[in-house]
Image: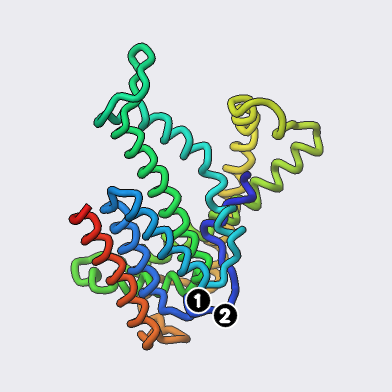
Amino acid sequence: MIRDITLGQYFPCESGIHKLDPRTKIIATIVYIIAIFAVNTFIGIGFAALFLMITTIISRVPAKFIARGIKPIVIILVFTFILNIFMLKGGEELVSVGALTITSGGLKRAFLLAFRLILIIWCSSILTLTTKPITLTDGLESMLRPLQRIGVPAHDLAMMMTIALRFIPILIEETDKIMKAQMARGADFETGNILQRARRLVPILVPLFISALRIAQDLAMAMEARCYRGGDGRTKMHSMKFARRDFVACLAIMAFLVIIIMEAHIL
């Protein structure tokens, strides 16, 4: 399951989504996530899923990559779903077992929350799978640059966020190596129930923590060896420019937002 996490990875491909300006994709992702939280009906969730499905087809990212990205959060989804079924109330009472009660309103909102989480992970995966880390850094820095007037270090913040995102697949690979090394020494991570398997993952944390510190130290030394001093005086090899496809994408995401808002008010 650890190897199934796709967040932070890049899928090289020639598609319309890959060619979009990173700022366009970042803005579209933010707008989409905001719109998702405005959805309160299954019709709206279905339309949001259809919009994201069309985007995925245009991006030419294989569906298996999206499925792999959602697979690791299945346990969290199930736990959140069960918790919200009993915590959220409203509507007609369906089942009552002692102090635990399931209502139609709670069931509906639990399903909506689960679908929202799936769509958010799906949307975030599309952003990272279609955008190179260095391009994502440039896009974030460009969007944060106006905040420099009030003392916000735009370049440093963008670099930190991108490094953190890039560390996800690196740490996943390190975790896989540690697990294989321990399995070669007789460790068992595949059998038993969820609690037993989670307990067996505890011995992985110490070597993973040490490995993460070593990687961070190597990265810092490499940046110092290349005389990295932040964003002052730095120039870009490729300047970012909005093209016609970026305006088309912005119109599409704004149309999506308007439809979602109208659907929320009508239904």
- State the image quarter where residue 94 is shown: top left
Name the mark on residue 108.
Answer: none
Binning the other alpha carbons within 10 Å of mark 1 as few (below 14), some (14 to 19) or many (20 upward) gives many
Name the mark on residue 14.
Answer: 2
Q: Position of residue 17 (x, y in %)?
A: 47, 75
Q: Residue furthest top?
A: 98
Q: Please give the name of the residue rendered at 37% of the width and 59% of the height, measured from the top-left corner.
A: 48
Instruction: Report the Cα–Cα distance between label 2 and label 1.
Output: 6 Å
Are the residues tagged 2 and 1 within 8 Å (C-beta)? Answer: yes
Binning the other alpha carbons within 10 Å of mark 2 as few (below 14), some (14 to 19) or many (20 upward) gives few
Q: Secondary structure at mark 2?
A: loop
Name the mark on residue 18.
Answer: 1
Circle 1: residue type: His
Q: Please give the name of the residue rendered at 38% of the width and 66% of the height, measured from the top-left corner.
A: 158
Q: Position of residue 151 (x, y in %)?
A: 22, 66
Q: Please give the name of the residue rendered at 32% of the width and 68% of the height, measured from the top-left corner.
A: 154
Q: Position of residue 72 (x, y in %)?
A: 56, 45
Q: Reply above or below: 2 against 127.
A: above
